[in-house]
Image: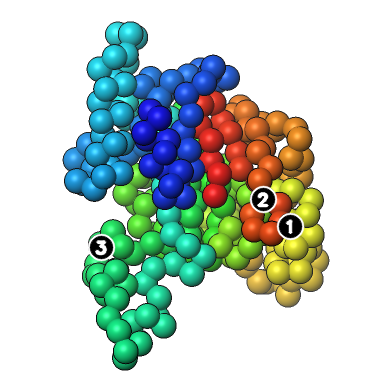
Amino acid sequence: MAAMSAVLSSLGLGTIRPSKPSLSCFNSLRHQTSLLRCHSRITRSPLNRVLQACLRSNYANADDASVSSPQEHSEIVFMGTGTSEGIPRVSCLTNPLKTCSVCTKATEPGNKNRRLNTSILVRYIRPSGTSNILIDCGKFFYHSALRWFPTFGIRTLDAVVITHSHADAIGGLDDLRDWTNNVQPHIPIYTAVRDLEVMKKTHYYLVDTSVIIPGAAVSELEFKIIHEDQPFMVNDLKIIPLPVWHGSNYRSLGFRFGNVCYIR
């Protein structure tokens, strides 16, 4: 587990830390969390070998005979693990003075070098059903959703939790209109006051819908304020904010739920 945490942290994928459980549905990674839908999707990369070993060893050591498979429980889907600009970069592909093998390969369909904005989706199993909680909705969100939502059978979004107000975390809020126009009436957005103030400028028409032209179909969002020193609940899942520095003099929020910590 320590090795897994180190690898995830070094790649900017967040961390998973063993500690005293706070929720039964995230009681232990071996019982409750499947980071990948099936072992057949795990490639031979160093990161995925660590994930595979962790899943297998934890499942093998499970002391609950009722646990038939790690895939039957709450899971985390990595929507993106890239930088704000993403990979590939146009400036790299069009540079006549050099050839970048990473960006070149990233243009190939399905290539793993293609990296989108960092984000995760928590599929939280509770007695009344599954809740889909998205953490961050960056400018490449729609591309991530096109890739992963059909793959994992994800249709609804029960909530979006925002870490900070940079474009790689909120740039995709407008794309949520596809859900609120065609799937569900609205989506709750959990955000700190300072980030909502930014959204009042960058996405003013989503915060104050009175300015919308009649007949315009925009995202129907319900903004809910969270405080960095207070845990909050999202569909029975307790989330603890973790204030962190995101560059010089800029505050961002990481989040802990159960035994899982997400810090970007």
Give the residue displayed 73% in from the left and 75% down from the top. 213
For marks 3 and 2, give the CA distance: 32 Å
How crowded is the residue under tag 3: few (<14 C-alpha within 10 Å), some, or many (20+)?
few
- Furthest toward the bottom, the residue is 96
Dot 1: within a 10 Å radius of its alpha carbon, few (fewer than 14), some, or many (20 or more) residues?
few
Q: Earlier in the sequence, mark 1 or mark 3?
A: 3
State whether residue 25 appears in this view.
no
**How crowded is the residue under tag 2: few (<14 C-alpha within 10 Å), some, or many (20+)?**
few
Q: Look at the numbered discs 1 and 3 and tell me whether their residues touch, using CB distance below 8 Å.
A: no
Q: How many marks?
A: 3
**Residue type, label 2:** Trp
Mark identifier at residue 111: 3
Look at 25% across and 62% down and name the residue there: 110
Q: Secondary structure at mark 2?
A: strand
Quadrant where the N terminus sits is: top left
Please state the horizontal and vertical placement of residue 49, each as a whole percent of the image: 24, 39
Res. 249 mark: 1
Amino acid bearing label 3: Asn
Query: Height in image: 61 above or below 255?
Result: above
Residue 202, visible in the rendered structure? yes
Judging by the rendered image, the residue that carries numbered circle 2 is 245
Residue 4 in the image: x percent, y percent? 37, 35
**Depth check, front residue: 6 or 108:** 6
Q: Residue at x 40, y 30 (%)?
A: 2
Q: Is residue 24 above or below residue 8?
A: above
Q: Is residue 1 above or below residue 228?
A: above
